[in-house]
Image (cartoon, coloured by chain):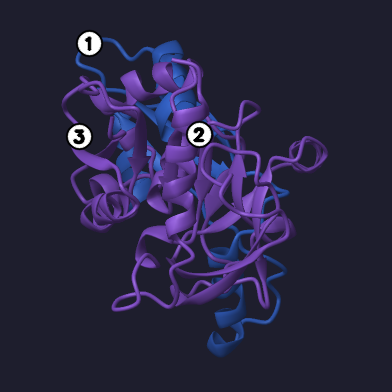
Amino acid sequence: MPRVVVDVMLKPEILDPQGQAVANALPRLGVSDVASVRIGRRIEIEFAGEPDLDRAREIADKLLANPVIEDFTVRLVEADETADARS
Amino acid sequence: MTARVGVVTFPGSLDDGDAARAVRIAGAEPVRLWHGDPDLHGVDAVVLPGGFSYGDYLRCGAIARFAPVMETIVDAAHGGLPVLGICNGFQILCEAHLLPGALTRNQHLHFRNRDQILRIESAGTAWTNAFQPGQEVLIPVKNGEGCYVADTATLDQLEAEGRVVARYVGGNPNGSQRDIAAITNPAGNVVGIMPHPEHAVEALTGPSLDGLGFFTSVLKHLVGAPA
């Protein structure tokens, strides 16, 4: 069954202290070539029937993201792609 | 007639008891409201208390915004009902678009819990008319996601319209833009504040009695308000 994936990211102009904390930890792993890290949220939606991108966009705009501080993208993925993304 | 001030309890609210107590100490009758009940039971004003409504899942206040009681409160607030959102309540008011901007993770990522000096910038709201503009008050702050953000145009508009209600003084505890601790809507009946006035209403439990002014303000406002 295809799923709708919603990716939510803080807008570029909004400070991401979580991402900064992760970026600051990287040198401890010996990683010194990362310029910045930003953290977002991935949400997978499975519709009871056919996936509905417009409906997903409405859900994202009203609930999943706060458009004041966050941008979101909505896309369809096949079930096996979802599994790949997790592996 | 004693004013009746509603205090909403969401699943995960923590400070509803203290808010109701503050209402009582200020001389009004607290009325407990339940998140699942859209009926406001005829209250004259509403307090959205602090806590972690619905576990703060997704974003603080994002799910509480869709509670049945909130739909009624949003409509009533547009009609002039005084609404005070404290901490999580402030987050809910932003998520419900009754106030502009948003509250994000404290810049330093630490939960901050301390007594905080605030400067009252606007005494023209339903919840701050008992203060003098420029007056400094001491009120506990305790939050993990209290960093107020909005775009520059919104911040400039808030400043220009006198809608910044209070600012942090002597150190910004969470990185809020322009040291903003509290804001109001254009009509001045809806106020969101990150620190906790309900924890500063009696000498035994608070650092001052300064928080009481927010609750006596709304009583003053209700007496003066047209019926």
Q: Nearer the viewer, mark 3 or mark 2?
A: 2
| Chain A painted colour | blue
Return the residue nearer the eye: A44 or B61.
Answer: B61
Q: Identify the secondary structure beneath mark 3.
A: strand
Apparent side of residue B112 relative to residue A85 in the rendered image (left or right): right
Chain in purple colour: B
Q: Which image quadrant is residue A59 in? A: top left
Return the residue nearer the eye: B130 or B30.
Answer: B130
Which numbered disc covers residue A49?
1
Circle 3 marks a residue in which chain?
B
Q: Which residue is mark 3?
A: B33
- C-alpha span from label 3 to label 2: 21 Å
Which numbered disc covers residue B221?
2
- C-alpha span from label 2 to label 1: 52 Å
How dense is the environment of label 2, judged by Cα within 10 Å: few (below 14), some, or many (20 and up)?
A: many
Quarter of the picture containing the N terminus of chain B is: top left
Q: Percent x, y for residue A70?
A: 58, 40
Which residue occupies 31% across, 23% down? A2
Return the residue nearer the eye: B168 or A49.
Answer: B168
Q: Percent x, y for residue A28?
A: 55, 89
Q: Amino acid at mark 1?
A: Gly
- Is residue B143 shown above or below B208? above
Circle 1 marks a residue in which chain?
A
Residue B9 appears in the rendering: no
Q: Are marks 2 and 1 in contact (CB under 8 Å)?
A: no
Q: Amino acid at mark 3?
A: Leu
